[in-house]
Image: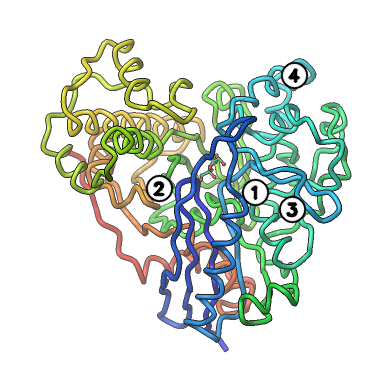
Amino acid sequence: AASGAVAAVDLGATSGRVMIGRVGPGLLALEPVARFANGPVERGDGWHWDFDALFGHVVTGLADAVAAEPGVAGIGIDSWAVDYGLLRDGALLAEPFHYRDERTAEGVASVHARVPFADLYQRNGLQHLPFNTLYQFAAEARLDEAETALLIPDLVAHLLTGERIAERTNASTTGLLDVRTGEWDLPLAERLGIPAHILPPLVDPGTRVGALTPAVARRIGAPLEVVTVGSHDTASAVVAVPLSSPNAAYISCGTWGLVGLELDAPIVTDAAREANFTNELGVDGRVRFLHNVTGLWLISETVRAWEQEDGAPVNLPDLLAAAARTDAPAVVFDANDPSLSAPGDMPGRIAAVLRAAGGAVPEGRAAFARVIVESIAAAFADAVRTAGYLADREVDSIHIVGGGALNELLCQATADRSGLPVLAGPVEATALGNVLVQARAHGWFGTDAPLETLRAAVAAAFRPRRHTPR
Ligand code: LFR
């Protein structure tokens, strides 16, 4: 058959979802079956993920998916990158840490004391993010007790199937993958005191992981198989960007805005390092040459603070509509300022960064939201320009996919500040990329269909909204 349905589990840093994806000739559709909140939880020793709750939502969501569509052929899992759980005797040693926990600072210092950043960049091609897994490992008290370290999607797959693997796109965010070969850089791991045995065998997207354990199959209601996808959410999102030309840039905009280009080969020049551009691995060995810009996190954390203040929910669409009616600010702030990275008092910290940049802190919430959106857009435009310059490409358009594609103010401000047309959508690009790679693995596109074939299916099913620069 050239058609069928799959279940996609997509876990973001602020929300997770389970979707049914239906694929066939002229058909690409998503049906949401479960959506749940996610976020940092504070424990005695810092910020963590409530992984038990998250896994519970995944299992319940999959059961709902099977109930709604008994023909589901398999399960694919993607999530945010870099975070992991340590296993011993088949159980988690501890609740996974959240990458925004500040313990990573000591990890950075100890790694760079052994391997200077410029050397690391030559080996792993990654921009400096203080939470990259290798820094977390360096700050990890119990690494020596672990049998295996599994990144979040691989950990979910393990609990579902019993298998232990490392999907390659997400493994590329650990800092321990050789950017040239896509294999574990074992000499680097050794220099950093990371035991090689905790790094599981690497597999590519589109690989059969295994069948659900009997206990899980009973809870979910069907004996399904888990298939790897681009398990790094950004890798799945990039699969589903309906790139209109080789010179089109993309912004995968959720909690983060991942801004860049798809390339065939990594760029690890001094200029790329100094601009802090990363070479993460995409599906089919493509390179995601991009920069992390702090995205909707600035808005969601601000809203969270206001909700705590009010003891009542804030309506985000209303807030953004009101923001669009205020005047654009004369001065924006650096969305990537490191002081905005940790959870807590975001309005106060943004005000401090804005004042330091010489800007006036606006009175009302609508105007405050406007400064945030314009600051994110300015950082997006800047990163697109830099990407084009570093890769020597004349960027001609920008695709914005993910939740940020719903934010018309942000999309228009990005067009205005970059001088380039912005094509907004699909919103659920990550889940679509997850579904498409599964569908290809099941043979519904022909097993060696290139990404361009998958993207053509996206372009046919989801018409982007166009924002012309003013
Ligand atoms: C986006 C994302 C980014 C990664 C950040 C932390 O959800 O996966 O690509 O840098 O989260 O994991």
Amino acid type, callout 4: Ser
What residue would you read off at disc 4?
110
Image spot of residue 272 (x, y percent)? 56, 27
Looking at the image, which is closer to me, 233 or 308? Answer: 308
Quarter-of-image position of residue 134: top right
Q: Which residue is mark 2?
A: 248
Residue 87: give x, y in percent of width and height: 79, 49
* Mark closest to the chain's N terminus, 2 or 1: 1
**Does mark 2 have its CB less than 8 Å from ligand 1?**
no
Using the rendered image of the protein, determine whether residue 6 is visible from the camera's viewpoint: yes
Would you call the spot at circle 2 few (<14 residues within 10 Å), some (14-19), or many (20 or more)? Answer: many
- The quadrant the C terminus occupies is top left
Residue depicted at x 54% and y 80%: 66
**First in sequence: mark 4 or mark 3?**
4
Separation of disc 1 and disc 4 at Cα? 23 Å
Towards the viewer: 140 or 377: 140
Q: Residue furthest bottom?
A: 1
Q: Mark 1 or mark 4, which has the lower sequence index?
A: 4
Mark 3–mark 1 distance (CA, rounded to whole Å): 8 Å
Q: Identify residue for label 1.
A: 170
Amino acid type assigned to the residue bearing label 1 in the image: Asn
- Ligand 1 position by quadrant: top right
Dot 1 and dot 4 residues touching (CB under 8 Å): no
Coordinates of residue 75 in the picture (x, y in percent): 61, 70
